[in-house]
Amino acid sequence: MHYLRTLLSSAARELREIGTNPWLAITGIVMPLIWVALTIFVMGEGLMRSLPVGLADEDLSSASRETAMQLEAIPSVRFVRYGSAAAAGDDLASGKLYGLIVFPKNWSADCEAGRPSSAIEVHLNKTYYAIATVLEFDIKSALASISLERLAAKSSAAGAGARGASERLFTLRSDALLAGNSNFNYSAYLLATLIPGMLSLAAILTLVGVYTRDVRLGTLRDATRGGTLPITAILLGRTLPWAAIFGLEILLYVLWFTGIAGWPAAGSSALLAAGALLFILAFAAFPLLATALAPSWILAMSAAICYCAPIFPYTGFSYPLESMDAAARVLADIFPLTWLLKLHAAEVAIGAPFAAKAKFLAILAALVLVPGALGLLVWRLKLPRLLAAEAQRSAETLPDEAPVEGFFSVGLAAIRRALLNRDTFLIFSGAIAFYLVFYAWPYANQTLTQIPAAIVDLDRSALSRRLITELDACPALSIKAVETNPAAARALYEAQAVSGVITIDQNFERDLLSGKRSAVSLTASGTFPVKGRALQAAMMGVVQNLTAAVAAGNLLRAGADTETVLKIASSPVSFTAENRFNTISGYATYIVPFVVPIILQAVLLTGIALSVGG
């Protein structure tokens, strides 16, 4: 009962502190809500629409005009017309254009003659990686669709009236579903990471200050009545109001996301809410451990920021975990946001059964219990030493600092205080180096590779096996299983052992060769659309190549001559893509230059504030 009374009394005192300390209420409650509201406002509808793309039609043919009209129908594209590619170059370099499409001279004539020497040029400003990637996918998808349409038309014309004409009029589709985010909405994609991330940062910073308040102010002896009150009860009592505040905020986020925002959960919103509460509690538990182990509150604050602020790359939301090196993947597993996103995918996008979600909930619970229990234990062991240090400080008379006057004198004094003080020196020097390496590490491999996928082969034919072999050869894919039972592949998908499932229709080979409609389809989680789009792009490329090969074989069987078949097999709408200003299309090349100034600014601001006021 004594322990419970101490805990409840501590919680009541913390509530009074929140009510009487406007600064604490503003920084701990109001500001996080403002961050969240501004982020939602900035995201808008979350769809990339009417992005400026240059169009230079140097061919000036009816075919180029028709193709340009078809491309202009893409919702993400708004053409800005130029007389030549050279005229658009400066605008592409300055960022006024995110891409440039060029129809070179004699393009249509070369296409009609089957000469592959002339191709549509697609230039993408990969400095703006996310935007350029959306444009790349949309433009390539449209060009591939146009190419297949014209391939079918040419095939039909070549065999008109000949035996087997129906064989040439096949249709092979590559369909894709990003479950929970079918139209690649950036709000659904980014806010699922950013909002919990912002709330966790607010929680961890607030609670470091709350747990170290008495140590900073020299009131630890009064708070514990000379060490007679259990420090663990005091700390847990202080946690309760803040856990309730941030817990309520993240519950409101879950209700907003799955209700008002229009992305209903395919599974249980209640389980997602439970996971979100565990997520917040994890950011109450880690400050307990950090403040117990760190020799000063400033270093505890630094450790808390290191644990929370730069972890977004490690969640897999912007760059797949499977594309990271093994050490980065291991590190990702200690961050609560990684597991909240997996739970979010299971509930909102996949609709997985409870058995598949229990693992994520259990890990989130462990990230609460383990650091929380260790932190309380160390605090209890550390209390006598803290009380002794406080008594010693109160008995000492600190010398008055000599007054410093003048702009340059004050500046030099601040620099000396920053560089010669243990805590602020680590902030200024060590933290900057740590953040820069830590943040860039997940992107070291630069490109998307080894995204796990399962294949359901309902046809089990020579052609379906050929398709599987070509898919397996794609660097972006890692085929983890080839199943004939859709339920087996679905179980892997629900457990998130694979990122997507590619299904080959039954009678795939027979339908293609007889001119009937057939499809290869992909199902992937919309919580991680970067992986889904990569799987879709790889599948689309393989399907396009297979389509051309099957069309050529059908034409030969129908009696067309070899020269005609070779001419038609040359893609009617061939294109080449060039990545500008980020030639390797690398993630680190794109994101690190943007993040470095932000990291420097944030760390320097923190260090300056601590050197002046700490």
Image (spheres, helix red, strand yellow):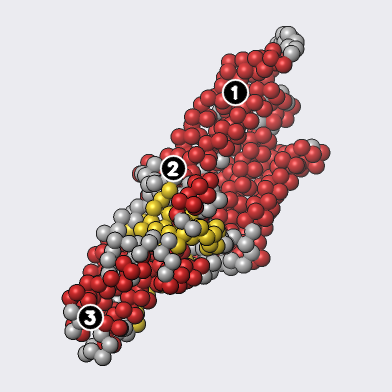
Q: Secondary structure at mark 2?
A: helix
At 64% from the left edge and 64% from the top edge, which residue is drawn?
A: 261
Circle on res. 424: 1
| Mark closer to the chain start, 2 or 3 | 3
Number of the front mark, 2 or 1: 2
Q: Which residue is mark 3?
A: 555
Circle on res. 589: 2
Residue 343 lies left or right of residue 249; in this view the side is left
Number of the front mark, 3 or 1: 3
Q: Secondary structure at mark 3?
A: helix
Q: Position of residue 371 (x, y in %)?
A: 53, 40
Image quarter in which the C terminus is found: top right
Q: Is residue 554 above or below residue 398?
A: below
Label 2 crowd bin: few (<14), some (14–19), many (20+), radius 10 Å: many
Q: Is residue 324 above or below residue 430?
A: below
**Kind of residue at disc 2:** Thr
Number of the front mark, 2 or 3: 3
Q: Please indicate, yes or no, whether residue 311 appears anywhere in the rendered image.
A: yes
Q: Position of residue 273 (x, y in %)?
A: 60, 59
Q: Is residue 412 above or below residue 376?
A: above
At 23% from the left edge and 80% from the top edge, which residue is drawn?
A: 554
Q: Position of residue 71 (x, y in %)?
A: 47, 68
Image quarter in which the N terminus is found: top right
Q: Please indicate, yes or no, whether residue 488 appears anywhere in the rendered image.
A: no
Residue 302 lies left or right of residue 521; in this view the side is right
Q: Are marks 2 and 1 in contact (CB under 8 Å)?
A: no
**Kind of residue at disc 3:** Leu
